[in-house]
Amino acid sequence: MSKSDTNKWLEEVVELSLLYDFYGELLSDNAKRAFEGYVLEDMSLSELSEETGISRQGIYDTVNRTVNKLRLYEKKLKLVEKFENMKQEVDEIRKLAEESRKGKDETEKIVSIAEKMLESY
């Protein structure tokens, strides 16, 4: 696997893990087990098939449907997007507070960002 392919794979695993953190409880137990095994635990289709008694093709189909569901949930609800935006805004508040502590008065900016965050969530 090339470095580029490895990076793409890692980015996808991180994306899917985050989606699963937010929406995993909306999935069936079978979908959760297949997804966790294949994506999060890096198990092979054969290993999961043996463990669950479901065919390799069944595991593959379940994982693909689950990935599509997770992406659909995010497309509709945008919880991960909102979370990422909030993290950026909190980081900006942290930086402004740090500057303020150094003697620069950034209080108005901090209040403005906090109000913006409260309005959007």
Image (cartoon, rainbow, N blue to C red):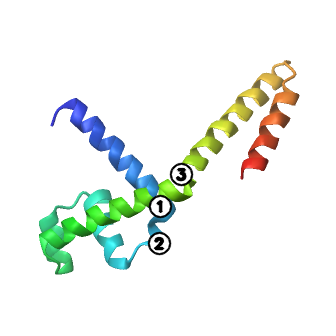
Mark 2 to mark 3 CA distance (whole Å)? 15 Å
Percent position of residue 117, x then y: 74, 44
Kind of residue at disc 3: Val
Which of the two residues, 105 or 26, is positioned nearer the viewer here? 26
Res 85 quadrant in image: top right
Camera-side mark, 1 or 3:
1
Cβ–Cβ below 8 Å for labels 2 and 3? no
Percent position of residue 109, x then y: 82, 29
User: Vertical placement of 59 versus 100: above or below?
Assistant: below
Badge 2, how many Cα within 10 Å: few under 14, some, many 20+?
few
Q: Residue at x 78, y 48 (%)?
A: 119
Q: Residue at x 34, y 46 (%)?
A: 12
Which mark is drawn over residue 26? 2
The secondary element bearing badge 1 is classed as helix
Cβ–Cβ below 8 Å for labels 1 and 3? no
| 1 or 3: tag closer to the N-terminus | 1
Kind of residue at disc 1: Tyr
Percent position of residue 77, x then y: 55, 58
Percent position of residue 78, x then y: 55, 53
- Residue 37 in sight from this viewpoint: no
Where is mark 3, residue-wise? 80
- Residue 92 in sight from this viewpoint: yes
Kind of residue at disc 2: Leu
Q: Does residue 23 appear left or right of residue 3 in this picture?
A: right
